[in-house]
Structure formats: C-alpha cells, structure tokens
C-alpha cells in the first residue's frame, strides 16, 4: 500500500493492500477501496463509497458528496457503488443516492472523461464512455456500451438504451432507444451501425434492428400503432429489446426522428414570431 503522507483517511475506511493514494486525498467516510485502485491527488471521497478493483480516480474528482436535490439533507447517508476497471478522470463529480438504502451505481470498464457529472441515483452499466463535461441529472439510467459525446446534458429520470450514441453538445429529456444515434435536442438521426459492428452484432442482427427502426420511425405509424404492429411479427432478440425499451418509456416518451424534431422546432419558432 502506498499512501502519501498528506492524505487524510477516515478511520473506518477499508483499503486493499496494494491501493495507491496520492497527495492531499481526503476520504471523509467509511469507504471501501478494492485491489490495485489508484486515487490521484486532491480526490475527495465522502460518505459510503465502495469500489471494486483496478479503478483509477483522476485528480480533483469528488465522489459521494450530497446530492443537489432540494429535499435531500446534506447529512443524509446514501451510497455510491463502483465496480471494477473504471477510469474516472479529473474533476468529475458523482453524488450519492438520496435514499439511505439506495445507491448511485457504476458498473465495470467504464470511462468517464474530465468534468463528467453524475447526479444522485444514476445507474451506469458496463463499457460506457462519457466524454468531457457531460451532465447527467438524477436517476438517469445508462445501459451497456453507450457512448456520450462531450458537453451533452440529460434530464432526470430518463433512460439511454444499449449501444446508443449521443452526439456532442446535445440535450435530452426523452428516452433514447437502444442502438440509435441521438443528436441535437430529443432527436435520433439513425442507427449506431459502427457501434453495433464493434460489439459483434452480425449482418442479420443489424438488419433486424434496421427493420425495427423503420417500423417505429418511418412507417407513418405513431408509437402506439408501431408497437401494436410489432407484436404481430417475429423479431430477433435485439429487435425485441428495441421494442421492449420503447414500450417501457414513461410520460415524456422517446426521442423523435430528427426531421420531425426539427420541423416541430421550426413550427414553434414561427408561432412565437407571429
């Protein structure tokens, strides 16, 4: 174990033998840090933070601070649970759950670039990449192998499906279906073909997802009609995953097709100007 002499460690913290802790790190609560983790200079861990093995926490990151929820008392004891082999780069912030028995969760093999913010009760799957300065509101759910471009913002209580990709500097308050390319404001521009290939989906699987996308977005049917039509057809597991996600959307619904979203925005602007 290598702990810099300037680090301040809570007496109830549990550290694996080969953890490395840099200068001026402050662990303010009963954290648990697994084997081969590296905590770089000026990191602050607050409260009940538990992480697995082989994680690297970048300079100045703050993990486990109280949420920015107005109803959440600063001394409330929520949790942050981090899996294995994650990289959380400098100045990222991850807030603890608003529930005493709840947790903000990060899976395995994720890469959070500098300045990422995860609000309370966010759940990240595995192999997620979030580029610099992206902001996730409370209770956002991010499935496996999602890629989020830099500077994106996400409303609380929304979902991002597996293998979706979000264009940088975009904003979302509606769910992003799996396998899609999301862009601008609450829109999808198509499918994440490159991501699907890299994840090992073959041509037949990709074609099924394309067919599902066309039925939902390009058939002229509304969402309820498209879901009803989908139930009359046989689909691959991936296409069923696509429709199941859409079926599970809550009040705000799913992102619109980009052309439709742009048209709605133009109509709203024209209405304001008249």
Image (cartoon, rainbow, N blue to C red):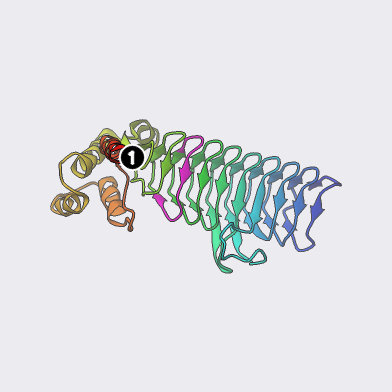
Along the horizontal axis of the image, is 187 left or right of 50?
Answer: left
Q: Quadrant of residue 261?
A: top left
Residue lying at 72% horizontally and 50% vertically, measured from the top left? 44
Residue most extreme to the right:
5
Q: Does the magenta stretch include residue 261?
A: no
> What span is in magenta?
148-159
User: Secondary structure under badge 1?
Assistant: strand
Q: From the top left corner, tell me how far across and down residue 214 is, in percent.
A: 20, 39
Residue most extreme to the bottom:
100
Q: From the top left corner, tell me how far across and down residue 154 is, in percent.
A: 46, 46
Q: Quadrant of residue 228?
A: bottom left
Residue lying at 51% horizontally and 35% vertically, measured from the top left? 150
Residue most extreme to the front:
274
Please, is residue 208 above or below residue 69 in the view?
above
Magenta residues: mostly which secondary structure?
loop
Along the horizontal axis of the image, is 145 left or right of 89?
Answer: left
In the image shown, does 170 or 31 lie closer to the viewer?
Answer: 170
* Badge 1: residue crowd in 10 Å (few <14, some 14–19, many ≥20): many
Q: Mark 1 points at which residue?
A: 187
Q: From the top left corner, tell me how far across and down residue 188 is, in percent.
A: 32, 38
Along the horizontal axis of the image, is 112 left or right of 210?
Answer: right
């Amino acid at each position: 174990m290598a702990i810099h002499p300037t680090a301040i460690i809570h007496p109830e913290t549990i550290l694996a033998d080969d953890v490395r802790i840099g200068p001026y790190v402050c662990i303010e609560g009963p954290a648990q840090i697994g084997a081969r983790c590296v905590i770089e200079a000026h990191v602050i861990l607050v409260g009940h933070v538990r992480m697995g093995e082989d994680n690297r926490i970048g300079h100045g990151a703050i993990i486990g601070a109280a949420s920015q929820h107005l109803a959440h008392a600063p001394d409330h004891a929520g949790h942050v649970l981090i899996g294995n082999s994650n990289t959380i780069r400098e100045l990222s912030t991850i807030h603890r759950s608003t529930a005493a028995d709840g947790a903000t969760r990060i899976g395995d093999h994720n890469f959070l670039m500098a300045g990422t913010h995860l609000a309370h009760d966010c759940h990240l799957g595995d192999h997620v990449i979030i580029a610099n300065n992206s902001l996730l509101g409370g209770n956002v759910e991010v499935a496996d192998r999602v890629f989020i471009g830099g500077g994106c913002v996400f409303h609380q209580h929304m979902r991002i499906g597996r293998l979706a990709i979000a264009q940088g500097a975009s904003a979302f308050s509606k769910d992003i279906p799996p396998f899609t390319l999301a862009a601008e404001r609450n829109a999808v521009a198509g499918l994440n073909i490159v991501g699907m290939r890299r994840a090992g989906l073959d041509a037949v699987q990709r074609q099924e997802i394309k067919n599902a996308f066309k039925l939902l977005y390009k058939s002229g049917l509304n969402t309820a009609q498209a879901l009803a039509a989908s139930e009359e057809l046989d689909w691959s597991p991936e296409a069923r995953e696509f429709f199941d996600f859409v079926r599970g959307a809550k009040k705000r619904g799913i992102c619109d097709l980009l052309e439709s979203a742009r048209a709605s925005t133009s109509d709203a602007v024209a209405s304001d100007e008249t």
